Image (spheres, rainbow, N blue to C red):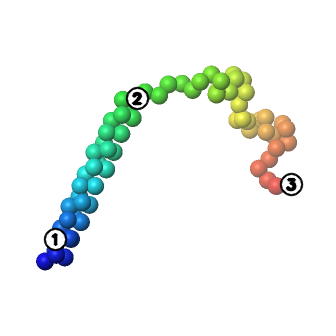
Amino acid sequence: METLIALAAGALLVALGLSLIHRLNAQHDARIAAYHFSDPFPAISRPPGRSHDRSAGQALSRGLTDAWP
């Protein structure tokens, strides 16, 4: 009899924990949806004209290929 009560109490605690986690997740999702992210700070972004993207023409003119030497 004590085993059944212990199992029922454990199942109840697990169910309460799951519902608490679910409610906290829903609250967090609502908070994220309400916040609109802005542009990054100017100090963090790269200055205009400077990027790491190279077009195929630039790479070929500099002798860069995808193969090992």
Which one is earlier in the sequence, the residue at label 1 or at label 2?
1
Mark 2 or 3, nearer chain start:
2
The spot of residue 32 in percent (x, y) is 39, 35
Question: Between 58 and 50, which is closer to the camera in this rendering?
Answer: 50
Q: Residue at x 26, y 60 (%)?
A: 14
Q: CA distance from mark 1 to mark 2?
A: 45 Å
Residue 36 in percent (x, y) is at 43, 27
Q: Disc 1 or 3, which lies upstream in sequence?
A: 1
Answer left or right for 32 relative to 26.
Answer: right
Residue at 36 percent of width and 34 percent of height: 31
- Tell me which amino acid carries mark 1: Ile
Examine the rendered structure and indicate whether residue 57 appears above or below residue 17: above
**Residue in the picture at 81% in, 40% down:** 60
| Disc number for residue 5 | 1
Q: Amino acid at mark 2?
A: Tyr
Q: Which mark is drawn over residue 35?
A: 2
Residues at discs 1 and 3 in contact (Cβ within 8 Å): no
Q: Nearer the viewer, residue 59 or 13?
A: 13
Badge nearest the viewer, 1 or 3: 1
Alpha-carbon neighbours of circle 3 within 10 Å: few (<14), some, or many (≥20)? few
**Label 2 residue SS:** loop
Q: How many marks?
A: 3
Q: Quarter of the image holding residue 40?
A: top right
Of circles 2 and 3, the one toward us is 2
Q: Is residue 58 left or right of residue 46?
A: right
Q: Residues within 10 Å of mark 2 (few under 14, many from 20)?
A: few
Instruction: List the residue tagged with mark 3.
Output: 69
Report how far apart the C-alphas of labels 1 and 3 lie in the structure: 72 Å
Nearest the viewer among 54 and 12 is 12
Outermost residue on the front side: it is: 2
Q: Position of residue 66 (x, y in %)?
A: 77, 50
Q: Amino acid at mark 3?
A: Pro
